[in-house]
Structure formats: structure tokens, C-alpha cells
Amino acid sequence: MELYELTATETAERIRKGDVTARAVCEAVLERLDAVNPAINAVVARDDDEALQAADAVDAARTRGEALPPMAGVPVTIKENVDQKGFATTNGLRLQKDLIATSDSPVVANLRHAGAVIVGRTNVPAFSLRWFTRNGLHGHTRNPHNPAITPGGSSGGAAAATAAGIGAMGHGTDIAGSIRYPAYACGLQGIRPTLGRVPARNATAPDRHIGAQLMAVSGPHARSVADLRLSLTAMAAADLQDPWHMPVPLEGPSYPRRAALCISPEGLETHPLVEAALREAAARLTDAGWQVEETDCPPLREPARLQLQLWQVEMERGAKAAFEKEADPDALHVLSEMQKVTSVPDRDQLMDALQARVGFMRNWQMFLSDYPVLICPVSAEPPFPDMLDLEDFPRVFEAQLTQVALPFMGMPALSVFTGFGDGEAGRVPLGAQLVGARFREDILFEAAEAIEARGPAISVVTPQG
């Protein structure tokens, strides 16, 4: 096995034991980046000297006999919409190509404190708006499994890099599926944590409006569930810059091993390949001793509409001029299509949306007390043909019901890989979404580990071209 193929947990263990140096791992990943990134355009900024210096610091600490932090020497990537000192926080925009951060976002600082080595920054769509990844600043990111399908978005660069062996973990953010969907599309494990689990702040920008404050989170993509555990633990360290952060233990009390299976929430037309993946995930959980019951779940369509209203008012208030000035054709098209789904709310509609949120949170909290895990689609369709939203946005938006709705309630959700299938655009990864109660990521990890253990392992993929 090549060093770039090691998982994060394997890397940290080998370095801790002295079987390999952090520099050797870093050099291997940087060579891998040179070899495969031209085909996928996942990493769009890098500082090899800084990465190697960080790796050397890990090796020096081990030589001195110091206890190493949990992610010591693990190569990771950072999404280009969060602050990393010395780099531009572009968010995929030409307008922000010179917006250089002078400090790290809390999530970046936490990863550094845990010993992670940052090997590059990953691409996003303009404004981090789409489930596809292309912008006028850095260009088009491709899926390393199949260039005919999307790598997902907005963390498409993060997932594509991790799948191709450019780092053992890819940092992502999720306000409407931007961690879960790229994990699904690139055949990875990925978790959207509970709101408040991972501290957030970009000092390069004003604080965000209430919609993003309630729904946007950071989380990891990885090639194993164990790596999600390791990475999320590192990311979740407290930081006073984020008043929403909650120092809730990562392990909760015991729970009944009971799961709900919902194939077609609220009449969603779930593709047969997706249904098969969901039933396979349920069968693996049953084999692991879980009780799985097929049932309906609480509402998703109205939360999705209200989520979109909050998103719309934030863009209208804080980003309308930037959309016009950036003039990214993809972003303008998606924005116009979103406005057809629901208009920008007035004051009363905004207040009504925030009031309704509490009721939906209550419904879901009660449901998840009976069923600690819900198995449902990540998307109603296999990974989309690339750029499909420019041809048929209504089809894309309908399929992404769970992606849009669940963040409205602030709950955690995990995209777990189940295998491959033959879709509209050729061979595609498939998976299931696991949903849990707030701050019960530990339950999702245990369920995902049971599913992972009974399926194919995730291997690094070498892209064509």
C-alpha cells in the first residue's frame, strides 16, 4: 500500500509508532497531488513548504519523546470558503481572489492543534451555491470515479481530493447537503455534524445572517468511519469565537438499537438503484443486531421550503450586489431557479419560518427518541450527470429534498457508502443517509460502522485523463 492510500487513523498510528515519518507521508501525498490533480482540479491552492514544515514539526516532537496529538502527521485539505492564514478565502469568486486571511478559522486552528498537516485548499462552486463544482476563478472539478457525473458540491473539491488520495480527510461545509452529497457522489463517508458541534468563524467577513447561523456547519469527508470519528473529535474543540458552539460530550448515553427505514419520504420518487442501496444498508444493520422498521418520517417538504426562504433572504440582504458583480453564469442561473421555488420572504414570513422551525425540531426530536437512526436517501437519484442543474433544475432540487430540509432542524446526518451501481451516466457510487438526534453523532458512527463492516472497503481511486 502506498503511503497516500493510508486512512487517517492508520497514518496517525504508524507515525506514532515510528513505522513511517510524517515527512514521508506528506511527500507521498504531495506527489500524488501532482500526479492526479490535473485530471480532477480538486486542489486549487497549496504551500508545499508550509506542509513539509508542519510534517517536520511532528517528526521532531516524536524524536524528543513528546506525546503526539491525535491527528499528528495526517494530511488533510481545507475547503476554500473558510479562513486559512496566508490564503485567500475565495468562496469560488474572482471578487475575493485577494481576500487573504490573517488568521485561521476555528476549525482550521483545531485541526492544526490536533497535528494535521494541511496539503491544499479545495475548489467550490461560486458562492458555494450548487451541488456541482465549477467557477470562473479556478474552473471545473471532476469526479475521480467518473468524469461524467458530478463530484457534488459545494464541497466537491474536498470529496474529489479525498477519493483520489490527496489527503486522508477533506474538510467540508454543509448548509444544504454540501458535505453529505459530495461524499455520496465520490464514494466516501461524510458527516454533517449538529449545529454547534464544530466552532465556526471567518474573520475575513462579517458575521452571517440568521439562516446560515442556524444551518451552516463544518465537517469531514474520509475513506472510513473511524476517520470521521477522529476528524470530528479534532474539529469540535471549543473556541470562544463561536457563541453557537456547545461543549457537549461526543459520546452520549445508551440507546435502543432501533432504526427507521424511509424509502420515499413525503412521496419522493426514489430511483430503484437508491432504493436498493437503502435496503442493503438496512439489511446490514439488521445483520448487526439492529431492529429496522420501515415507516414514514416527520415532514421534510415544508422545512425544505422554509430553509430556502432563509437562504434567499440572506442572499438578498447580503449577497445580491456580489452576485451581480461576480456575474458567474452558473450561480445566476441557480439563483433565478431558486427564486421560482419560493420568493424572498417579507418580515412576517421570516418570523413565521423561525417560529415553525421549533415545531419541526420538536417533531423530529420525538421521532428520533423512538428511532435513534433514520435510514433515508441522500438523494432520490444516483449521482447526477455533471452540470444537470443547468439543464433541469427542478429535477435536481426535487431529488435533493433531504439535503435541503434536514439542516433546517440543525440535526446531524451521515452519508455512508454502500457500493457501486450502473446509473444514467455509467458506473456510480451509491450510499444511504443516516439521520440522528442533535449531538448524537456517536449513534450515527456506530450504525455507519456496522454498515461499513459488511460492505466493500473504500479504496483510493485513480482518475482517468
Image: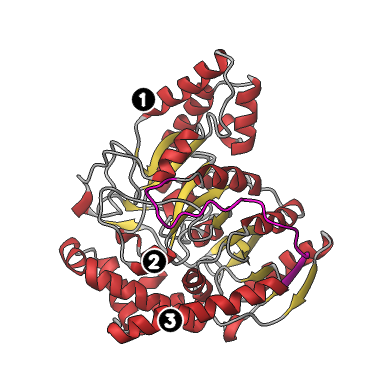
* Side (left or right) of 400 relative to 296: left
Between disc 2 and disc 3, the foreground one is 3
Mark toward the start of the polypeptide (1 vs 2): 1
Check disc 2 and report its element: helix, strand or loop.
loop
Does 153 sit above or below residue 22?
Answer: below
| Marking on residue 387 | 2
Residue neighbourhood size for the residue with mark 2, other residues' Cα within 10 Å, grouped as few (<14), some (14–19), many (≥20): some
Instruction: Look at 69% across and 48% down and name the residue there.
Output: 457
Instruction: Look at 36% across and 78% down and name the residue there.
Output: 309
The image position of residue 400, as x and y in percent, is: 49, 73
Q: Nearer the viewer, residue 145 or 364?
A: 364
* Side (left or right) of 394 relative to 293: left
Q: Main secondary structure of the magenta part?
A: loop
The image position of residue 213, as x and y in percent, is: 38, 63
Check disc 1 and report its element: helix, strand or loop.
helix
| Marking on residue 355 | 3
Check disc 3 and report its element: helix, strand or loop.
helix
Residue neighbourhood size for the residue with mark 3, other residues' Cα within 10 Å, grouped as few (<14), some (14–19), many (≥20): few
> Do tag 1 and tag 2 residues touch (Cβ < 8 Å)?
no
CA separation, marks 1 and 2? 35 Å
Mark toward the start of the polypeptide (2 vs 3): 3
List the residue tagged with mark 1. Answer: 49
Residue neighbourhood size for the residue with mark 1, other residues' Cα within 10 Å, grouped as few (<14), some (14–19), many (≥20): few
| Marking on residue 438 | none
Residues shaded magenta: 239-260
